[in-house]
């Protein structure tokens, strides 16, 4: 009996040791005011919630054991240096760090991680930095093809040769190769989306980029760059579909290419589920189900971190109809419970003031007039708008900065009438203190005309920000965003101190 018990304990030890990854090393000239962190994404994307602080001894040495049951990509972060790591169960890695370098020196995971450094997986490409980003935005499609697309594909082929010369198993080579191609394409896709290119040029570049992408969309063992690529690929299919709809004059009642549902149906469904459901449908029509299950789980997590309760509930319900045995279901249910609790807790919060429909306001100045004596920071947003929700994450810090100052926060939301309750719930779940006004697409038009009357840029995109001085005069159109931090504070301070 004793021998059996010892055998079982040894077996459990072996199993547990093979479900972990050990990272150790030393930081030279260690500064205790700086932190060493590792970020391990659930599926893809970089979210601070996935970061874990690593304890560092006074002499700069560190050791951490990470629970890893399958191959995972992670990011090691120290002193502004970001380095991708490849973690495999049962392996280890030793690294030496300085303020500007991370060098891998030993361990059973040494080869794959040195390879990741050799192929420059973490390098920010030149075309995403100023002034190249602005200069390249003036180029034609033919010039962008020669200066960006062709060199990018050539670089991928060159780095693939580096991967091929390693002694790594073929499966690890395939994983690293997929991450390489995906990361390079993601960067160029980001350029096409954020550079101020003419829309036909941007669309053509995206169509050509993804049309030439050499990535196996059936691979269920991809890393975060691969899944980010899939997210971008769905946007590419959307662009491709609508180019096809326009050129072939496909009626809104006919199925959308690559998505399998009509535009009329898509619009009805997105009113209920948000755009995340549209991408869920696209994923189901173009990727294997195991990939869709992981991809959509990350979308659900994103909705939770956005505190978007109504969309989280709707998309979770649709997800569970397709994946009823998803292992993450208890976690998502807990997310929903957490947000429900926040909604209940903030229903009586008197610092959240909603301007109800029974008090019609047809001009933004009707509202601003009530706030004379205060500087007003106006946020024009929508619950459907991803960048708007991203910026809202920075508002607690902004409000803390001006807690005792003469400043009011006003939110002008554009949501259709059928989303009125979702709008109210979103505000309360997020404890979005301030004054709130909702208008539908038609009603908000005169507000845009007022706000952009003297602006050079008349574009009505979301989010946008405006600052009114203490007399109620609009003094800054297209103000800086909450994520701009100190730059925005300086902008507000200048008006506060007048």
Image: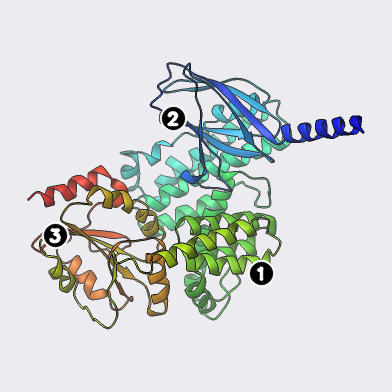
Look at the image and tell me whether residue 185 can be seen: yes
User: SS at mark 3?
Assistant: loop
Q: Residues within 10 Å of mark 3 (few under 14, many from 20)?
A: some
Can you tell which mark lies on residue 229? none
Q: CA distance from mark 1 to mark 3?
A: 50 Å
Helix, strand or loop for disc 2: loop
Q: Is residue 368 above or below residue 251?
A: above
As measured in the structure, the alpha-carbon distance from the residue carrying label 3 to the one carrying label 2 is 39 Å
Figure disc tally: 3
Rendering quarter of residue 159: top right
Residue at 28% over, 45% down: 485
**Mark linked to residue 35:** 2
The residue labelled by disc 1 is 321
**Quadrant in which the N terminus is drawn:** top right
Q: Kindly check if marks 1 and 3 are in contact, taking CB atoms under 8 A apart as contact.
A: no
| Residue drawn at (44%, 62%) of the image | 342
> Would you say the residues marked 3 and 2 are in contact, meaning their CB atoms lie under 8 Å apart?
no
Front residue (pair 299, 195) = 299
Residue 252: give x, y in percent of width and height. Answer: 51, 79
Q: Classify 10 Å Cα crowding around label 2: few (below 14), some (14-19), many (20 and above).
A: some
User: Could you tell me how far apart the alpha carbons at marks 1 and 2 are, in whole angstroms?
Assistant: 43 Å
Indicate which label's residue lies in the foreground, 1 or 2: 2
The answer to whether residue 259 of the structure is visible from this angle is: no
Give the mark nearer the N terminus: 3 vs 2. Answer: 2
The residue located at (60%, 28%) in the rendering is 113
Which residue is under mark 3?
Answer: 374
Relative placement, left or right, of 11 versus 415 is right
The residue most toward the front is 2
């Amino acid at each position: 009996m004793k021998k059996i018990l010892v055998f079982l304990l040894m077996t459990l030890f072996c199993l547990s040791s093979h479900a972990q990854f050990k990272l150790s090393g030393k930081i030279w000239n260690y500064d205790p005011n700086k932190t060493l962190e590792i970020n391990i994404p659930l599926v893809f994307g970089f979210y601070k919630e996935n970061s874990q602080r690593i304890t560092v001894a006074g002499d700069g040495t560190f050791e951490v054991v990470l629970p890893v049951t399958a191959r995972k990509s992670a990011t090691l972060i120290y002193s502004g240096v970001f380095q991708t790591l490849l973690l495999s169960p049962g392996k280890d890695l030793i690294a030496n760090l300085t303020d500007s370098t991370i060098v891998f020196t030993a361990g059973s995971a040494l080869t794959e991680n040195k390879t990741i450094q050799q192929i420059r997986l973490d390098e920010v490409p030149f075309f995403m930095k100023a002034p190249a980003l602005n200069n390249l935005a003036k180029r034609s499609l033919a010039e962008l093809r020669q200066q960006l697309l062709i060199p990018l594909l050539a670089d991928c082929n060159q780095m693939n040769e580096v991967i091929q010369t390693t002694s790594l198993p073929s499966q690890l080579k395939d994983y690293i190769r997929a991450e390489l191609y995906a990361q390079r394409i993601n960067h160029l896709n980001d350029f096409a989306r954020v550079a101020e290119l003419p829309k036909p040029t941007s669309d053509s570049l995206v169509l050509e980029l993804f049309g030439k992408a050499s990535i196996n969309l059936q691979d269920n063992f991809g890393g975060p760059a691969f899944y980010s690529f899939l997210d971008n690929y769905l946007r590419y299919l959307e662009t491709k579909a609508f180019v096809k709809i326009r050129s072939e004059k496909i009626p809104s009642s006919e199925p959308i290419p690559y998505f399998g549902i009509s535009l009329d149906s898509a619009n009805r469904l997105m009113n209920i589920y948000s755009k995340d459901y549209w991408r869920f449908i696209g994923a189901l029509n173009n990727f294997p189900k195991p990939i869709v299950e992981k991809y959509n789980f990350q979308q659900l997590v994103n909705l939770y971190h956005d505190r978007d309760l109504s969309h989280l509930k709707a998309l979770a319900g649709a997800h569970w109809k397709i994946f009823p045995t998803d292992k993450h279901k208890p976690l998502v249910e807990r997310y929903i419970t957490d947000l429900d609790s926040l909604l209940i807790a903030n229903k009586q919060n008197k610092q959240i003031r909603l301007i109800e429909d029974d008090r019609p306001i047809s001009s933004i100045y009707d509202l601003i007039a009530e706030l004379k004596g205060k500087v007003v920071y106006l946020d024009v947003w929508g619950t459907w708008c991803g960048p708007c929700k991203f910026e809202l994450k920075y508002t607690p810090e902004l409000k803390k900065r001006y807690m005792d100052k003469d400043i009011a926060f006003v939110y002008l939301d554009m949501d259709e009438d059928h989303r009125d309750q979702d709008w109210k719930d979103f505000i309360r779940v997020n404890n979005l203190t301030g004054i709130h006004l909702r208008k539908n697409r038609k009603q908000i038009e005169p507000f845009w005309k007022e706000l952009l009357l003297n602006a050079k840029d008349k574009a009505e995109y979301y989010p946008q920000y405006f600052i009114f001085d203490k007399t109620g005069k609009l003094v800054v159109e297209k103000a800086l965003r909450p994520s701009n931090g100190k730059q925005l504070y300086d902008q507000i301070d200048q008006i506060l101190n007048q």
